[in-house]
Image (tube, rainbow, N blue to C red):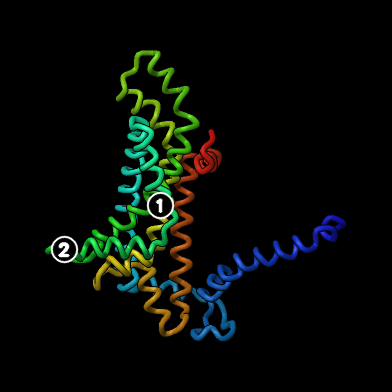
Amino acid sequence: MNSIKKHGFVAVISVFVLAFLYLPIISVVVNSVNANEHLISWGGFTLQWFQDVLCSKDFLAAFQESLLIGVAVMVGSIVIAVMAVLGSRECGSKMRTFQDSSMYLRLTLPEVVLMVGILAVVRMLPGTALGPVWVIAGQMVIYSAYAIVIIKARLSIVAGLYEDAAYDLGATTLRCLKTVILPLLAPSILVGALMAFTFSLDAVVSVVFLGGPHTETVPILIMSMIKKGITPEVNAMGVLITLFNLAVLAVIVKSVGVKQAVSSLGGGE
């Protein structure tokens, strides 16, 4: 009690921040099971809105599109990140500086600026049309940088000692890569893959700029629906996507363990 009185201002700010973070999520969950179609008041508990969403052809098509793009972006981003991190060790200092500058530029530049630039390049290519392929390419440009940061931090901590030991025992470069480096990087690779996948599921700007008229992901579908107002179906979609993201996170954590997943973000063991 004395501690609360002493740090009352900090406690109030903390409560405000937590409320700001979690009240919208609670509101979405509650309204997704609210039987009142207009969400004016509580009308009782129902799962009707989830049934309507899961039976909606528009939602299923949009979710399939999001899933295909997300998986492609995840795989492509991880391949780019692993190759960039391992390749940078064989480069000179100037090339490593250039790679780091490129990575941080992709992290700091507004996504809309990058998408406008990619759109301008696509428009200059004859015979090309906007669509999912360009959405995947645009997202990989950005999300591979996040994977590089995570994998590079992990590699700088864990690889040196074990790698030297493998070479001392007569391992070739390929065998060292296969049996030492990649297994040590596995937790950070999985975490980087999770980040690229979840970021892709939530992406809006890249789809708007590069998707063309026929590419509709779940965020784009939700945006088109809320133009007519917030409906229970929109809240149900939000809950389903959240549950899906949590399920993917649970699989990753189950695969590598909580300690390994957290250490991969921090770069430590």
Rendered location of residue 210, percent (x, y)? 28, 65
Secondary structure, mark 1, is: helix
Identified at 35% across, 32% down, the residue is 92
Rendered location of residue 187, percent (x, y)? 45, 39
Rendered location of residue 19, percent (x, y)? 65, 67
As drawn, the label of residue 130 is none
Closest to the observer: 206 or 28?
A: 206
Q: Which residue is mark 2?
A: 128
Secondary structure, mark 2, is: loop
Earlier-in-chain disc, 2 versus 1: 1
Identified at 45% across, 83% down, the residue is 229
Seen in the picture, residue 91 relative to 192 is either above or below; the reply is above
**Does the rendering let one see residue 185?**
yes
**Does the rendering let one see residue 68?**
no
- Toward the front, the furthest residue is 94
* Image quarter of the N terminus: bottom right
- Cα gap from disc 2 to disc 1, whole angstroms: 27 Å
Closest to the observer: 101 or 154?
A: 101
The amino acid type of the residue labelled 2 equals Thr
Seen in the picture, residue 190 relative to 19 is either above or below; the reply is above
The amino acid type of the residue labelled 1 equals Leu
Q: Residues within 10 Å of mark 1 (few under 14, many from 20)?
A: few
Seen in the picture, residue 36 relative to 11 is either above or below; the reply is below
Horizontal relation, residue 233 to residue 34: left or right:
left
Identified at 39% across, 69% down, the residue is 219
**Mark nearer the viewer, 2 or 1:** 1
As drawn, the label of residue 105 is 1
Q: How many marks?
A: 2
Horizontal relation, residue 125 to residue 88: left or right:
left
